[in-house]
Image (tube, rainbow, N blue to C red):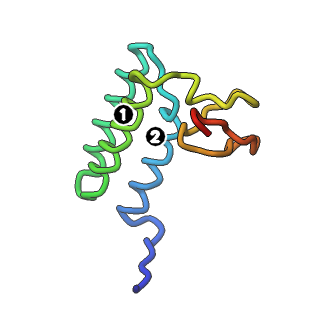
Amino acid sequence: MAERKFIKGCKEWLMFQDFYRFVQSYYQPESREEYWTSCIDSVSELHKTHKEVSLSKHLLLGFLNHIEEVSKGQNEEEWICPACGKFRNPNDRFCRHCGEKIERNGN
């Protein structure tokens, strides 16, 4: 498979930089209305800025789906490491922050 790298400063490179900053700001969903309003406004602005990069729409929608899924019906305790108290993926077998083994139902 041929390797292709983004050239620093190209439209894709700039889009990934902006997407990374966006994810850092909104990764842990909150229940406050201000969080969601700000998040949606940021998505709209990023989409306008990077609409010529077709992947940007898919990344933004995928991320919105992710944080919506996290914020809905999931038991919040499943998203918090019992050892260090940091946010984690409920499918992880070990905490990415402290390395603690995560006991899951039936395991």
Residue at disc 1, secondary structure? helix
The one nearer the camera, 58 or 80, is 80
Which quarter of the figure is the N terminus placed in? bottom left
Q: Which residue is mark 2?
A: 22
Q: Residue at x 29, y 57 (%)?
A: 55
Q: Position of residue 6 (x, y in %)?
A: 43, 71
User: The C terminus lies in which quarter of the figure?
Assistant: top right
Residue 59 rendering spot, x and y as whole percentages? 34, 49
Residue pointed to by mark 1: 42
**Relative to 47, 29 lies left or right:** right
65 relative position to 90: left or right = left
Name the foreground residue: 79 vs 33: 79
Q: Residue at x 41, y 33 (%)?
A: 67
Callout 1 amino acid: Ser
Disc 1 and disc 2 in contact, CB within 8 angstroms: yes
Residue at 28 percent of width and 44 percent of height:
47
Question: Which residue lies most toward the bottom here?
Answer: 2
Distance CA(mark 1)–CA(mark 2)? 8 Å
- Label 2, residues with CA under 10 Å away: few <14, some 14-19, many ≥20: some
| Image quadrant in which you'd find residue 78 | top right
Q: Secondary structure at mark 2?
A: helix
Q: Does 45 appear above or below 13?
A: above
Which numbered disc, 1 or 2, marks the residue that appears first in the sequence? Answer: 2
Residue 38 placement (x, y as % from top left): 39, 24
Residue 97, given in percent of the width and then of the height, sits at 71, 42
Badge 2 amino acid? Phe
Depicted 59 relative to depicted 54: above or below = above
Q: Residue at x 33, y 44 (%)?
A: 62
